């Protein structure tokens, strides 16, 4: 066993961890360690945007967790893939750049999270962002994270936008401006035809810093306390154990599943659960692992025979893919710059909703079972996701083994209101699919199209819904008894330890979670630097 000493140790090189490692190592007087269980981000599937289509099948740079059986999904087991490489899920996601709504952050502040209102977080979104097209007070132009329009939008993504307008939605060219509501094409975290992950933005340009130590293929077993202060990180690599020590702080950025799991393996969490697994309770913190929630999502699929602009499995489709591969390899242009989920919309499931509570992702291919099931021919898909679910679940440990997957129980659709709003949102999505701009080319699959009554549509939802990959909340911030971290993301009762990732969100944001997670880390980095003795 060897011992290595650093000022800061960041556990997890995902969206938050890459930001923290880069920002903290700007000070040459401190030593920063960044620990990642996965491999380096060298796979072409990461850098080629369309490589996302193969990630769910290969799990080269991702880890496919499963939920426990979900009563709200008719007893089905859900699929929960998470990035496992430098960049984390920002290296495996669909690259949509969405911040959420202003009210999301004002609600955080209203619930006791001082410093997290919209006026407090907007400067950090701007600090992180470099937007290639939009130059106004809502966007940054000098940040590390490149945000761009799709380089080669698919013709069907444009038709989806037309169909949305025909269905009564306003056309928008910026979902992150004064209002989120409307239909349009997503901006994406790409640059020059490649994915621009948090690792690409924050880590890659700074790897030459002598005080930044990036360790891949390293599993963190637990955090060790010295006189009640978090000081040690016990790791495993290739069968060898190693202890790293932090002179100042340990920061967990392992995500909504692994950050609470790591706390619990370390003896920090709900005492009864830890004792049931034979783990010594170092600090009883009942909220660890609780408050898990996610965006429940159901996918409408349509066949579009002969529409070769769409990505699909056919002789013509194979030839177009080869052409696109050549264009990408030679010039980083063409069809493989797609993020698949090219178009989107935000709207209210019912007129009396105060804010948009439904998000759409229009996918230029037929998507079945998270892309793990091959479907022949050409078509398109429409994700319908509920932005503010009421259902809450939890994450628990299976055992003490750091290599064991946690028990993930999001309790999808356990609250009746979630089903009602998702059902209403799907009906509006079906109206978009029925507009002339799309209906002339494709036909919705019968299973959903024939679900007419409330009961039929609810059954279809429960049979088909799953995650859209946005788990949050399991180490939520706040001041009450079930909060895990305070408003500056310090773990209650454990000095020297913070959690900085999507797990700290007290309430999920209204949209994709990658940009908000980066913002959280930018804000936390300032607090961490300001707290230096």
Image (cartoon, rainbow, N blue to C red):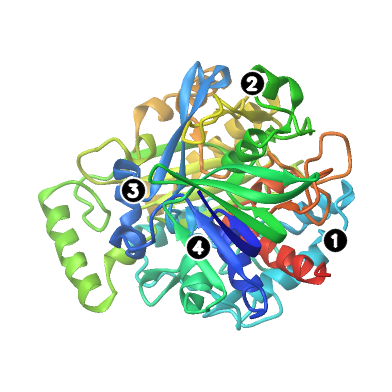
Please report contact status of discs 2 and 3: CB closer than 8 Å, yes or no: no
> Reading the chain from its start, which is encountered first: label 2 or label 3?
3
Q: Residue at x 75, y 24 (%)?
A: 271
Q: Distance between the residues labelled 2 and 1?
A: 38 Å
Residue, disc 1: 115
Residue, disc 3: 55
Q: How far apart are marks 2 and 3 (CA)?
A: 36 Å
Q: How far apart are marks 2 and 4 (CA)?
A: 48 Å
Q: Which residue is drawn at 66% across and 74% down?
A: 30
Residue, disc 4: 186
Label 3 crowd (10 A; few <14 / some 14-19 / many >=20): many
Please report contact status of discs 4 and 3: CB closer than 8 Å, yes or no: no
Residue placed furthest toward the front: 1
Q: Is residue 147 left or right of residue 151?
A: right
> Reading the chain from its start, which is encountered first: label 2 or label 4?
4
Q: Which of marks 1 and 4 is in front?
A: 1
Q: In which quarter of the image is residue 524?
A: bottom right
Q: Quadrant of residue 471?
A: top right
Q: Residue at x 38, y 72 (%)?
A: 151
Q: In this view, does 373 lie above or below 91?
A: above
Residue 421, position in %: x, y?
65, 33
Q: Nearer the viewer, mark 2 or mark 4?
A: 2
Q: How far apart are marks 4 and 3 (CA)?
A: 21 Å
Residue 339, position in %: x, y?
39, 59
Residue, disc 2: 278
Label 1 crowd (10 A; few <14 / some 14-19 / many >=20): some
Of residue 314 and residue 333, the one placed in the foreground of this image is 333
> Reading the chain from its start, which is encountered first: label 3 or label 1?
3
Label 4 crowd (10 A; few <14 / some 14-19 / many >=20): many
Q: In this view, does 396 lie above or below 146?
A: above
Residue 415 visible, this angle: no
Q: Which mark is residue 51?
A: none
């Amino acid at each position: 066993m060897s011992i290595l000493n650093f000022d800061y140790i960041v556990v997890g090189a995902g969206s938050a961890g890459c930001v923290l490692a880069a920002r903290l190592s700007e000070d040459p007087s401190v030593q920063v360690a960044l620990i990642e269980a996965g491999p380096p981000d060298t796979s072409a599937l990461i850098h080629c945007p369309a490589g996302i289509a193969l990630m769910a099948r290969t799990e080269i740079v991702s880890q496919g967790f499963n939920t426990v059986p979900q009563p709200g999904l008719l007893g089905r087991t859900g699929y929960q893939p998470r990035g496992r490489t430098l960049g984390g899920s920002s290296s495996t996601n669909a690259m949509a750049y969405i911040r959420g709504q202003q009210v999301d952050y004002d609600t955080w502040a209203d619930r006791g999270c001082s410093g997290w209102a919209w006026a407090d977080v907007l400067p950090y979104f701007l600090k992180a962002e470099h937007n290639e097209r939009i130059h106004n007070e809502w966007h940054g132009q000098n940040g590390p994270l490149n945000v761009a329009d799709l380089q080669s939008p698919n013709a069907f993504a444009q038709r989806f936008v037309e169909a949305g307008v025909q269905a009564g939605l306003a056309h928008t060219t910026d979902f992150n401006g004064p209002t989120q509501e409307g239909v349009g094409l997503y901006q994406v975290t790409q640059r020059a035809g490649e994915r621009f992950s948090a690792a690409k933005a924050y880590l890659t340009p700074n790897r030459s810093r002598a005080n930044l130590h990036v360790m891949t293929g390293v599993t963190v077993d637990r955090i060790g306390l010295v006189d009640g202060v978090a000081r040690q990180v016990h790791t495993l690599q290739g069968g060898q154990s190693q202890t790293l020590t932090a002179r100042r702080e340990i920061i967990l950025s392992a995500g909504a599943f692994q950050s609470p799991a790591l706390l619990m393996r370390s003896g920090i969490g709900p005492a009864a659960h830890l004792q049931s697994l034979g783990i010594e309770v170092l600090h009883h913190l009942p909220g660890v692992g609780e408050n898990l929630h996610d965006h429940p999502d159901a996918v409408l699929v349509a066949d579009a025979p002969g529409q070769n602009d769409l990505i699909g499995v056919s002789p013509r489709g194979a030839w177009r893919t080869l052409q696109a591969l050549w264009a990408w390899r030679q010039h980083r242009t063409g069809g493989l710059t797609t993020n698949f989920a090219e178009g989107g919309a935000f709207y209210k499931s019912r007129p009396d909703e105060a804010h948009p509570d439904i998000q759409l992702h229009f996918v230029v291919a037929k998507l079945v079972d998270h892309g793990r099931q091959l479907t022949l021919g050409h078509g398109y898909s429409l994700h319908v996701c509920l932005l503010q679910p009421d259902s809450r679940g939890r994450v628990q440990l299976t055992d003490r083994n750091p290599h064991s997957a946690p028990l993930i129980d999001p309790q999808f659709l356990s609250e009746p209101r979630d089903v009602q709003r998702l059902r209403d949102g799907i009906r509006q999505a079906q109206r978009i699919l029925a507009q002339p701009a799309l209906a002339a080319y494709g036909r919705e699959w019968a299973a959903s199209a024939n679900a007419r009554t409330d009961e039929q549509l609810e059954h279809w939802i429960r049979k088909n819904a799953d995650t859209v990959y946005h788990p949050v909340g399991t180490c939520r911030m706040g001041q009450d008894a079930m909060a895990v971290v305070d408003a500056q993301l310090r773990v209650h009762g454990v000095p020297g330890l913070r959690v900085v990732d999507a797990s700290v969100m007290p309430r999920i944001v209204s949209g994709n979670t990658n940009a908000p997670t980066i913002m959280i880390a930018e804000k936390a980095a300032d607090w961490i630097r300001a707290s230096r003795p």
